[in-house]
Amino acid sequence: MTSLPSTGSHREISILLVDDQPAVRCGLRMLFQLEAGAVVVGEASSAGEAMTLAAVTRPDLVIMDVEMPGLDGIAATEQLIDAWPTCVVVILTIHNHPQVRARAFAAGAWAVIEKCRPEDVRTAFRQVINFLDAVPQ
């Protein structure tokens, strides 16, 4: 993960949640309700649905499951980054295999986080805020 110093004034960060499991999306939504500046702008149950929603919502941050039916999260990440280079994608995975991490980073993912570690998702969100605050709007 890349971490840059914060400028101290955080803007709202729009988030798109992408996971084929409704319970995971619900948990992520509840997690982001605890974070100041986090605004969940949509939820998708597939990578294809995520691409459609991203075109409409233009999220700052996409939390993307790595394994989904059809187009997987890594291929979708590459497509998202190609379409919207300023979008930050964080990949969620159950299995933290080095091959998955390497593929995700090669596709443009900003971070790869284990699903069972919600505290890491919150930490990544705070680092994304600092990163986006440092990027001129």
Image: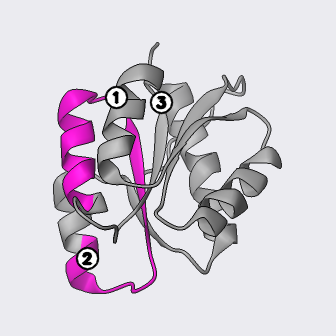
| x 37%, y 43%: residue | 49
Mark found first going from the N terminus, 3 or 2: 3
Judge left or right: residue 94 versus residue 121.
left
Q: Residue at x 39, y 48 (%)?
A: 89
Which residue is denoted by mark 3 in the rendering? 59
Q: Is residue 1 visible?
A: no
Identify which amino acid the numbered label 1 is placed on.
Thr
Nearer to us in this view, 22 or 90? 22
Q: Residues within 10 Å of mark 3 (few under 14, many from 20)?
A: many
Of labels 1 and 3, earlier in sequence is 3
Q: Nearer the viewer, residue 3 or 19?
A: 19
Give the percent coordinates (x, y) of residue 61: 49, 39
- What residue would you read off at disc 1? 86
Circles 1, 3 touching at the beta carbon (< 8 Å):
no
Picture quadrant where residue 69 is located: bottom left
Q: Earlier in the sequence, mark 1 or mark 2?
A: 1
Left or right of 107? Residue 36 is right
Is 1 situated above or below 133? below
Gap between marks 1 and 2 measured at Cα: 23 Å
> Can residue 86 be found in the magenta stretch?
yes
